[in-house]
Amino acid sequence: MIANFLAGISTSTSMRLPEPEPLPRPRSRRMYAGARMSRLTADWLAGQTSADAEIKLSIRQLRNRARQMVRDNPYARQAKRAVELNVIGTGVQLQARVMKLRGGMRDDAINQRIEMLWLQWCRKQNCDASGRNDLQRLARIAVGAMVESGEAIFRVVNRRDRRGKVPMALQMIESDMLDEEYAGPTSQTNSEWRLGVEIDEWGQPLNYAFFTRHPGDSNLVGRVDDNRRHLIIPASEVIHLFEPDRPGQTRGVPWFSAVMEDAHQMAGYEEAAVVRARGAASLMGFIQSPEGELEGDDVEGEDRLTDFEPGQFRYLNPGEVVQVPQLQAPDAQYEMFVRQKTRRFAAGMGCSYETVSKDFSQTNYSSSRLSLIEDRDHWKVVQDLMIQDFYQRIYVQWLQTAVLGNVLQLSDYEIRPERYEDAAFWQPRGWQWVDPLKEAQAYALMEDRGYITKSQICGMLGTDLEENMRQKAFEQQLALNLGVNLADSPVNNLTTDTASQENGSSGTA
């Protein structure tokens, strides 16, 4: 019955269903402005590549151009020099702080033996395989190599020093020797070669593939085939220093990589400005006569060659007219352009404008101090890298070699190596401030209030409190033996004067 009823309805009437409403247009998804594609960003090309993939395509050209900049560009030369001097300076000093097993005091006898043997090994005839550089100079070269080439590489070799003490030395290897194209057999199943470094599945270096001869020596010695032979060195013998920018990065890139284009443009602009100024200074005037010039210009290849010198007048042929351009050089934009480009260069290098340009004409005490603080924060980061990856790494291996070679007798080193290896304190260089008197007053006041200690103040100045106290005791004893009355230290007076100035200023306020 229901079926017949429905059939009757379908035949007797025609029911029309309402048409569906049109769907709204899909709106554009929200996205970052930096990722939006438009006619203004059509030339902004960026690929999804790993750090090593980008480095492999660029590392050789970056190194070559960075070295050319250091050779020829004064700003690049100064930037490299500034990093070397501010990070290492005269060197990072070792202070052994081995503690006694009981009593909580330092073991001065052991500490002095370690420090004396370390200082002896740091001499150039002992620590450098070539016998040319002491350890501090090697550290400065390493920092400069990271700036210029992106990385510094050392090999730890077994070599007895001149006095037959610790049989260990360092061989510095330029980054060109590490073959980024090497793809030989691996030592483990899950390892792979990346830019000349064999890494395991966790990214830890296992081996390094070095050329047996520098690739750039082909023009010097005429042996290209030697560059095809490789020397595989285990990672335990290699110190590879670089500052990574991205996770998974295997090799370092020159610090000039972000400023190369600006530096090249600025060098071209300055060259053009100099040529323009020389032309304006050399061009004096022309003489035109019916007879023409007395002596013809030199002609070579059907081209007339004309040279201008300062104070010179030239003759013209009949009918020739010279239009002298308005050579206003340097123009008003020159100084502003060079200063702006130099600021960009300094920012890309992590230095202040004053450090790179040596231009202090627009600074005062406050601005100079602020720029120095920014610079020194950067230097401290690089100092920490050098202390952890260079000095401490060398010290631990040196200590092991000295004990195994029976050069340094440490009875419990085999069962407690961390007692000695972790007791090394490294004192990097410190810095002076713009106004030493104000800083000294501030340090004295902060010490008086308990904010910092004498050891911290000495650390900021690049000195060691213990060494200062020893030296002061020696001077006092020497003065006593010679009958000399040394004046009291003015630190207490300085603190008192500073406190009185503080109270006086607060009372006035």
Image (cartoon, helix red, strand yellow):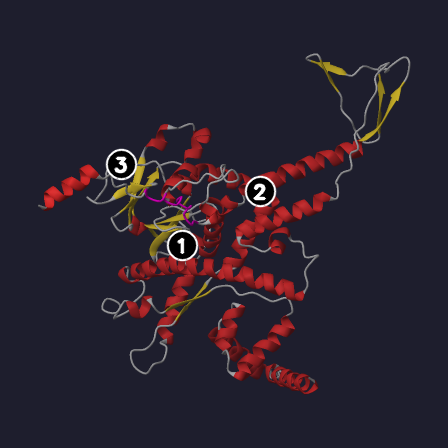
Could you tell me what secondary structure mostly forms the magenta stretch? Answer: loop
Which residue is pictured at 70% across the width and 37% down the height?
A: 273
Which sits earlier in the primary sequence, circle 1 or circle 2?
A: 1
In this picture, residue 377 sits left or right of residue 30:
right
Which residue is pictured at 57% across the width and 42% down the height?
A: 262
Q: Is residue 395 above or below residue 27?
A: below
- For marks 1 and 2, give the one nearer the viewer: 2
Q: Position of residue 102 (x, y in %)?
A: 29, 81
In this picture, residue 188 sits left or right of residue 75:
left
Q: Which residue is mark 2?
A: 262
Q: Is residue 488 above or below residue 269?
A: below
Q: CA distance from mark 2 to mark 3?
A: 39 Å
Label 3: element kind = loop
Q: Which residue is mark 1?
A: 126
Residue interval drawn in magenta: 19-31
- For marks 1 and 3, give the one nearer the viewer: 3
Q: Which residue is mark 3?
A: 184
Residue neighbourhood size for the residue with mark 2, other residues' Cα within 10 Å, grouped as few (<14), some (14–19), many (≥20): some
Q: Is residue 100 above or below residue 28?
A: below
Label 1: element kind = helix
Q: Quadrant of residue 328?
A: top right
At label 3, the amino acid type is Gly
Which residue is pictured at 55% across the width and 59% down the height?
A: 375
Quadrant, the C terminus: bottom right
Q: CA distance from mark 1 to mark 2?
A: 43 Å
Quick check: is 30 in the magenta stretch? Answer: yes
Quick check: is 480 in the magenta stretch? Answer: no
In the rendered structure, are the residues bearing label 1 and label 3 in contact, judged by CB atoms less than 8 Å apart?
Answer: no
Q: Position of residue 379 (x, y in %)?
A: 50, 59
Q: Nearer the viewer, residue 58 or 133?
A: 58
Q: Nearer the viewer, residue 24 or 384?
A: 24
Which sits earlier in the primary sequence, circle 2 or circle 3?
A: 3
